[in-house]
Amino acid sequence: MAEDATRPGGPVGRIVYDEPTIRRRVQQLGEAISKDYRDLHPVLVSVLKGAIYFLADLSRALQIPHQLDFLAISRYGRSSDETGVVRITKDLDIPITGRHVLMVEDIIDTGLTLRYLLRILEGRRPASLHVCTLLDNRTRRLVDLPIRYRGFAGPDEFLIGYGLDWREDWRHLPYLAVLARP
């Protein structure tokens, strides 16, 4: 029998951003991006798997033609902090040279992985390269990043839901909540 995530003792603690709040903010981001990228036919790039829910909803909120592409990465070393080494395990299928690229992230913490990915993408000479993140956790940031669109401030707590997981579980929750117990 599947575990009830919200029962006492379950993994879901305090709900930080509920489903209607997320839906409204994603719609607002979609409107801003549609305005800024009008007539530019951007490529939205995301790292699998965490941002897939945000990317799908953001894509539906856009009112402009756009394409989607994905990267997959693996981390070696201590992946929970800045000492891990990143390796791309799935590269883009769409050439981005001369294209307007929007990197779509679920959450930005230290920023080190994103900085690495942006350097890789910048080397492919896109016309522009900007970042959209659902959650921006500035308290853990170690590097400056060109974040153009921010959904919410990320609390300095471990979150699950809306694509964020704990050991590959709880991505499916339609809200963002604090992980109450590992």
Image: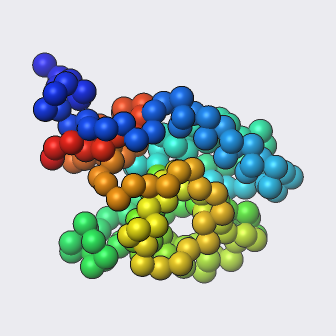
Protein image colouring: rainbow
**Residue under the image location 25 percent in, 44 percent down:** 179
Q: Is residue 88 visible?
A: no
Classify residue 167 as left or right of residue 128. Answer: left
Classify residue 11 as left or right of residue 24. Answer: left
Classify residue 115 as left or right of residue 66. Answer: left
In the rendered view of the protein, which quadrant contains the N terminus?
Answer: top left
**Residue under the image location 52 percent in, 43 percent down:** 54
**Residue under the image location 47 percent in, 44 percent down:** 52
| Residue 14 screen position, x and y as percent | 31, 38
**Residue under the image location 33 percent in, 48 percent down:** 159
**Residue 94 vertical placement versus 34 (above, below):** below
Residue extending furthest top? 1
Count the marks: how many? 0
| Residue 46 screen position, x and y as percent | 52, 55
Classify residue 84 as left or right of residue 104. Answer: left
Q: Is residue 138 visible?
A: yes
Q: Nearer the viewer, residue 68 or 133?
A: 133
